[in-house]
Amino acid sequence: MFADLVSLALEEFARNVGEGRIPRALTHHPSADSVKPLAHEEYDDRGNWTGSVVMLLLLFPDTYVPDKFQTHINVSPAMLWLNGAGDREPVLRNVGMPKQPSGRKQNNYRTNLLEAIIGNLDKDYPGCDYARHLKALWTHVSVHMNHNWDAVQDMDIVE
């Protein structure tokens, strides 16, 4: 299920970008601060730590998806579409610590990006399957990670 959710999320991300459903303000965002106003919070927020992990899985699947699931991921990483400004990769790749202050630092930035994608799809395309699938992936990661840094380091978060 985990690999299927990640693969589906990446496939749908590419399709939604191609269909113009992901706003340029997200694909070409110049900073972490520029993403926050786009994050709408009218859904079950699973937290910055797990949201950050979801985005790491989508942005850098070759690095963060466990090897045993790599054969299931046959699509391009989301980083290709979220780096329109050309300088976001090093910043988004920087992994923060699990217990960061709320509303600040790397985990919050990646989670704001996830929230902005979900929120914009929910607002502009009610009932969008992609928003629903991203929420399912976020919930799946949250449940299986249980906010455990060692689980993320080993990427043994699900079976």
Image (cartoon, helix red, strand yellow):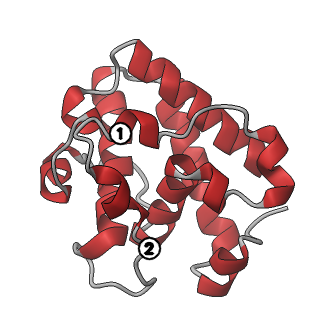
How far apart marks 2 and 1 lie (CA) works out to: 17 Å
| In this view, 48 is above or below 101 | above
| In this view, 124 is above or below 86 | above
Q: Position of residue 153 (x, y in %)?
A: 65, 79
Q: Amino acid at mark 1?
A: Leu
The reply, left or right, for residue 23 in relation to residue 6 is left
Instruction: Tell me which numbered mark, 2 or 1, is placed earlier along the sequence.
Output: 1
- SS assignment at label 2: loop
Q: Which residue occupies 29% across, 44% down?
A: 116
Q: Position of residue 27 (x, y in %)?
A: 29, 34
| In this view, 77 is above or below 123 | below
- SS assignment at label 1: helix
Q: Which residue occupies 53% across, 36% down?
A: 132
Answer with the quarter of the image where residue 157 lies.
bottom right
Location of the C terminus (image quadrant)? bottom right
Q: Which residue occupies 43% across, 84% down?
A: 97
Q: Amino acid at mark 2?
A: Val
The reply, left or right, for residue 98 in relation to residue 23 is right
| In this view, 135 is above or below 109 | above
Judge the density around disc 2: few (<14), some (14-19), many (≥20) Cα neighbours within 10 Å.
some
Q: Which residue occupies 28% across, 22% down?
A: 124
Q: Nearer the viewer, residue 134 or 96?
A: 96
Tell me if residue 132 can be seen. Answer: yes
Residue holding disc 1: 82
Residue holding disc 2: 95
Judge the density around disc 1: few (<14), some (14-19), many (≥20) Cα neighbours within 10 Å.
many
Q: Position of residue 146 (x, y in %)?
A: 63, 77
